Amino acid sequence: MLTGWRYRIAGFTGTVAIVVGAVLLANHPAAQALFTTHVPLFNRLEPTVLEGESRRWAILLSVVFVGGALLPLYKPQPRRLLDTVFLAQKRVVVGGLAMATLGYFKWSHRLPRQTLAMTVAILVVVIPLWFVWMRRRPTGEPGRTLLVGDDLEQIEQIAPTINAPVIGYLCPTRIVHHQGKASARIDDVLTDGGTVSDSRLAEIEATIDQYGRLGAMTRLGGLSRLEDVLLEHDVDTVVLAFAQPDRAEFFGALDACHEHGVSAKVHREYADSVLVSEGDVGELVDVDLEPWDPFDHVFKRVFDVMFATVGLVVFAPLFVLIAAAIKMDSRGPVFYSQDRTAGFGETFSVYKFRSMLPESEDVNPGEDDSRVTRVGCFLRKTHLDELPQLWSIFVGDMSVVGPRAAWTEEERLLEQDVSSWRKRWFVKPGLTGLAQINDAKSTDPDLKLRYDLEYIRKQSVWFDLQIVIRQIWNVVEDIAETVRD
């Protein structure tokens, strides 16, 4: 099975070869004669065999449009067989429609209708088979599974439940604590070339022995070697075993799995801390790394850029007026920034118009009116303090719709109240979201999380548009109410 860059290169070169072959086959005199004689709707057309420059243009345009439409498939991602087939067919049809549009408006060289129809028909069958074949595993070769985590006790518990061969495990080289008691492994010592006493060596060996199956497994290094191990050993499944998933390690491992098209799983007993796929019934359940369809990703990003660009241009004069009002109302800067949590637990700086007195932030969710300035009160009621976040959307740190990005300091408190709070990290944060239009705030983290998870499950371009329309209507109502007051 191909992974990583080998998959990308094979996917692209194979697609080019298949498209060229399909065009040449569709352009063959025998195929033209057969198609225009026996296929309804096309049996009134005359066979058209392209030659010379016209044939070269037909091949080039087909490669560009179909190859470009299949771009999401070049990235290896853990998909079910039917998902791969349907996605490939949908993308081939998109490329075919693009070529038909090009020919209809005569913007460039146009393919004869029968040639285009035969080419798309061939590609709809062959292209999905190619991508399925690339993900195949040689006959008799079982899947390769890797255990990754920092909890040896959990790794030992999970290992017997894995049916496929486990090539080894990755675990930090530092001392690992289990239930408050520090335990070490032999490779944790001797880092400076020193020696270990017999009594200390016996203690370490006893610690290793208590984890049973780990003694027969190979430790392949620390967590920093994850990407190297995925490529070196052609891993197709990673089972995560972290005591407490955190930004740097747990979500870093998920990000690496997503990048290399490797399935990520967790044991059902520990699945309450991650977003797992629905319908899994086994002991190991899949982590839902890619809730979005790749085609929707493109539309979502295009929509984000267009929304942010229009907003920045239209509200540019208002930026100046708001900045002047803030400076006249109170001392301090016009903008303030916060570090907020993004997808997979990464952080970014978000900017807003300052609505509070300087240095009056509080990590506890809520709002103290004594800290909010007069202009700030107006900005909050009309949501105008959020306008600078259009820049974060434009550069890609945020999306228009998604779970609200929380302040990193506030998130620590929210995680204490709601154990599943990290599930929100599986998608890019948004300016608005399902929780916002339903007035769910951080003061009720359980309700807010339920709305955010509902959005993650149901998200689509159309769902985003519905949320945006609802939010705009809410803003208009708030502004009207503020003006009346």
Image: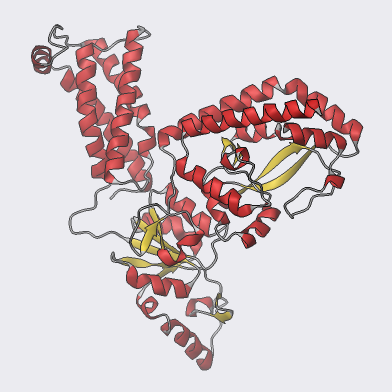
Is residue 23 shown to the viewer in this render? Answer: no
**Residue 28 in picture, x, y percent from top left:** 13, 17
Task: Count the labels in the image.
Answer: 0
Is residue 456 shown to the viewer in this render? Answer: yes
Give above or below for 106 relative to 27: above
Foreground pick, 96 / 453: 453
**Residue 372 in picture, x, y percent from top left:** 84, 42
- Identify the residue at image location x=45%, y=72%: 154
- Quadrant including the C terminus: top right
**Residue 40 in picture, x, y percent from top left:** 13, 14
Does residue 2 appear left or right of residue 277 in this picture? left
Does residue 21 appear left or right of residue 254 in this picture? left
Does residue 180 appear left or right of residue 50 in this picture? right
* Quarter holding residue 133: top left
Give above or below for 267 relative to 199: above
Foreground pick, 442 / 146: 442
Foreground pick, 279 / 170: 279
Does residue 287 appear left or right of residue 322 in this picture? left
- Identify the residue at image location x=8%, y=15%: 38
* Quarter holding residue 385: top right
The figure's colour scheme reads secondary structure
- Identify the residue at image location x=41%, y=65%: 267
Give above or below for 222 relative to 310: below
- Identify the residue at image location x=35%, y=31%: 70
**Residue 193 in picture, x, y percent from top left:** 55, 79
